Image: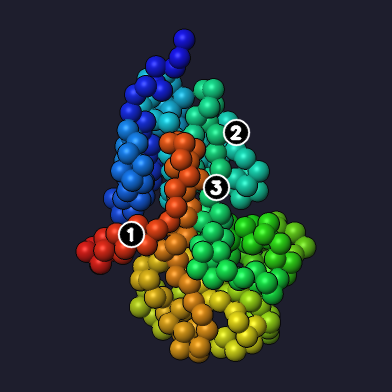
Amino acid sequence: MADSRETLTKNAFVVGYPIKHSRSPLIHNFWLKQFQIDGNYGAVEKSPEEFPSFLAYLKGTDTPYVGGNVTIPHKESAYRLADRPDDLAEELGAANTVWVEDGLIHATNTDGFGFVANLDDRHPGWDKSGKALVLGAGGASRAVIQAIRNRGISEIHVVNRTVERARELADRFGPAVHGHPMEALAEVSKDCGLFVNTTSLGMDGTDVRDIDFSPLAENAVVTDIVYVPLKTPILDMAERQGFETVDGLGMLLHQARPGFDKWFGVRPDVTSNLRSMIIADMEEHA
Ligand code: ATR
């Protein structure tokens, strides 16, 4: 007998705590409408105490959900509690996308895919130099490092205020990755074709000390994973120094694509209409 759920509306979610600022519902409902799919994507707020039972509920026969996204602060728990984390989630120790198959929770992490797909879209050839500089060594930095290493970038320099965290990532991600203190920034930026900011530097209104991007490769691109504001202090600085920049909004849009495909069976594109809609929402809620 066919699974009766297949004939019903498909529901997916984003779960976090808090969740009301998430733009994922706007993105996925835009695609559901575009493809005329009988589905819905909603925001679900669950505290860290409530999260394990929410995940367990997904496996039940009465769940309305086919899967969903997991955001702060549940990405590590989602990885730990999933029955089948894939290799990407395993290495990162964090998952942002889950789905149910044969009664088991599968999990992956699409942040790195989103990062690379955005660069491929906005600045093709970004990977040519084979060298990259990653500023910051937090959770977001890990997904970026994993993705660019998997893409074949053979020299990745991670620079962080707390150098121990940068060195920890170098140990975790293998011989392509090197950890350095802030003082080494100029020296290790030399000839890098990609500069990525993964920190919140300058976002709290404090001054960011000037970064000299001139050691980068001539056609280097500077990108930021922060997307509010679209032009972060670091992107502004790079632009003033004549470098090409790519903002972080595309990473958010592209990381959503594999999940949508898993839950609803269609691989959507990131279009200028989608991007404009999200920018309008950001302006409305600025
Ligand atoms: P996320 O998961 O978003 O990456 P995180 O794990 O808190 O968040 O990491 C934040 C990153 O921003 C870290 O690399 C942090 O540096 P430390 O490891 O030294 O804390 C960096 N960061 C935040 N504020 C900073 C500042 N004012 N100057 C330099 N680095 C900063």
Residue located at (71% from left, 62% from top): 152
Question: 278 above or below 263?
Answer: below
Q: Return the disc, 2 or 1, that comes first in the chain's sequence.
A: 2
Amino acid type indicated by mark 1:
Asn
Secondary structure beneath dot 3 equals loop
Query: Circle 3 is placed at which residue position?
Result: 109
Residue 109 place in picture, x, y as percent: 55, 47
Q: Residue furthest right?
A: 175
Query: Circle 1 is placed at which residue position?
Result: 273
Which quadrant: the C terminus?
bottom left
Q: Residues within 10 Å of mark 3 (few under 14, many from 20)?
A: many
Pick the residue in front: 209 or 39: 39
Question: 212 above or below 269?
Answer: below
Q: CA distance from mark 1 to mark 3?
A: 26 Å
Amino acid type indicated by mark 3:
Asn
Query: Circle 2 is placed at which residue position?
Result: 84
- Mark 2 vs mark 1, foreground winner is 1
Q: Return the disc, 1 or 3, that comes first in the chain's sequence.
A: 3
Amino acid type indicated by mark 2:
Arg
- The verdict on label 3 being within 8 Å of ligand 1 is no
Secondary structure beneath dot 2 equals strand
